[in-house]
Amino acid sequence: MTQSLADLLGNRNFDEPPEIQEIKQFVRKEIGSSASVSITNESFVVKLPSASAAGALRAKVYQLQKQLGSDKRIVIRIG
C-alpha cells in the first residue's frame, strides 16, 4: 500500500498558474527586474530583489491588478 516517491511526484502537476507567469512578465516588462511569486488564499506575494524595484512596482500595482482581473491583494516584499 505504500507508494514510492517517484510515484507520488510523477502524478503531480508542476506547471505554474497563469497568474504567476503574468505577474512575472509584467514585472520584467515594466520594472526590468526579476521576481518570485507565490499565491496564498487571499493574495499574490511578489518578492523583488531591491527596494527601488519594489517602489517602482508599487506605483503600478493598480495597473497590474486590473490586468490580472483578480480580486486578490498584491503584496510586495523585498528580499
Image: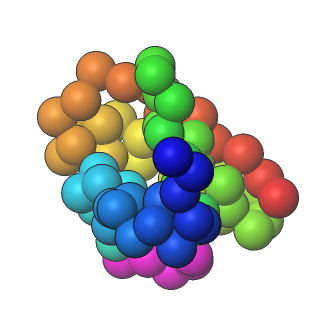
Q: Quadrant of the C terminus?
A: bottom right
Image: 61 above or below 43: below
Does the segment drawn in magenta span residue 79?
no
Q: Residue at x 57, y 41 (%)?
A: 45
Q: Is residue 31 visible?
A: no
To which quarter of the image does residue 29 belong? bottom left
Residue 7, x across and y down, in percent? 45, 67
The one of 10 and 37 positioned closer to us in this rendering: 10
Q: Residue at x 53, y 57 (%)?
A: 3
Residue 67, x across and y down, in percent? 19, 46
Side of 69 where 74 appears, left or right: right
To which quarter of the image does residue 58 belong? top right
Image: 24 above or below 17: below
The residue range painted magenta reads 28-34
Does the segment drawn in magenta span residue 30?
yes
Number of marks present in the image shown: 0
Residue at the farthest front position: 1
The one of 67 and 9 positioned closer to us in this rendering: 9
Q: Is residue 12 visible?
A: yes
Q: Residue at x 52, y 73 (%)?
A: 6
Residue 70, x across and y down, in percent? 24, 29
The one of 38 and 58 positioned closer to us in this rendering: 38
Q: Residue at x 46, y 22 (%)?
A: 41
